[in-house]
Image (cartoon, rainbow, N blue to C red):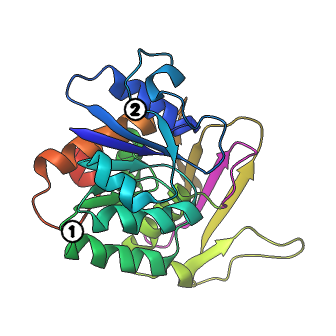
Amino acid sequence: MKLAIFGADGAMGRLIAGIVAGDPEIQIVGAFTEPNAPTVGTDIGVLVGKKATGTMIGDSTGLDKKIKACKPDVAIDFTVAKATEENAPVVVKNGVKMVIGTTGLSQEFMDDFKLLVEKHNAPSIVASNFAVGMNLFMKVAGEVAAALEGWDAEVIEAHHNRKKDAPSGTALTIADVISKAWDKKLEDVAKYGRPKGPCPRKKGTAELGIHAIRAGDIVGDHTVLFAGPGERIELKHVAHDRSCFASGAVKAAKFLVASAKEPRMYSTREVLGV
């Protein structure tokens, strides 16, 4: 499998490169970062403490020509929304499958990207979280929400102090799962934080509180709280480090190359068998 990595010198990109560098089934043929980054021209293998691969990190300018030159089967992208929305269409127009873990993507991009995936026969996955445990967590949260009709629910997430988007993409995905279990639209039930002063829940109205914490070097904590008369249930997922996301993304890339036969968007649940 020939792989290209976007955000190759970032935290996730380095983890992914480190994983695949020791995988005999995968060859890194492209590694990209932002223009003028100090890592441009560095061998991706050397960057992550492995033996040289012969693939140097390049910037994403003139991307169409570079993709045609390195001819990847699949690309993994963990960058920022602006970069993904600019680069991903170029990649799939070349028939290259994509695994995208970037969060904060616009709905307009998602709608257009889905059409490009279908048109150019480039099965792809866009997900807020590739961890196996988190995807099972989401499934369980939906089942609990469906079973506890009338209970109050809150989603609380915590991440490091450098994270740009809030709430996290994972928290929004969890919230969407819960709202669908209630047969509601997320935009109709979401309550982002609570303002100072009186702010009780409105009786008889579905409301889903969503809260974001930014502190220190927290990798990713997500808690869902369901509260009813005299009791409550709390579901919690804690990411100890980013390796769970990286290994899940690599697994998704292998799935797309080996098993994705239809030109459409796939889900992490299909990849992980959840």
Q: Is residue 147 left or right of residue 166?
A: left
Asked whether residue 209 is in view, the answer is yes
Task: Pick the residue in front: 13 or 189.
Answer: 13
Tell me which segment is drawn in magenta.
149-166
Q: Is residue 17 above or below residue 82?
A: above
- Closer to the chain start, of discs 2 and 1, is 2
Q: Determine the secondary structure under disc 1.
A: loop
Q: Is residue 6 left or right of residue 136?
A: right
Q: Is residue 13 above or below residue 266?
A: above
Determine the image quadrant of residue 189: bottom right
Question: Which residue position holds label 2?
Answer: 55
Task: Pick the residue in front: 73 or 139.
Answer: 73
Residue 133 x, y percent position in the rendering: 39, 39
The disc labelled 1 sits on which kind of residue? Arg
Residue 160 x, y percent position in the rendering: 70, 42
Residue 132 x, y percent position in the rendering: 35, 40
Residue at 25% over, 40% down: 2
Badge 2: few (under 14), some or many (20 or more) residues near its Cα, within 10 Å?
some
The disc labelled 2 sits on which kind of residue? Thr
Determine the image quadrant of residue 25: top left
Residue at 30% over, 45% down: 70
Q: How many marks?
A: 2
Q: Determine the secondary structure under disc 2.
A: loop
Residue 123 x, y percent position in the rendering: 22, 61
Question: Which residue position holds label 1?
Answer: 264
Marks 2 and 1, Cα distance to the nearest angstrom? 30 Å
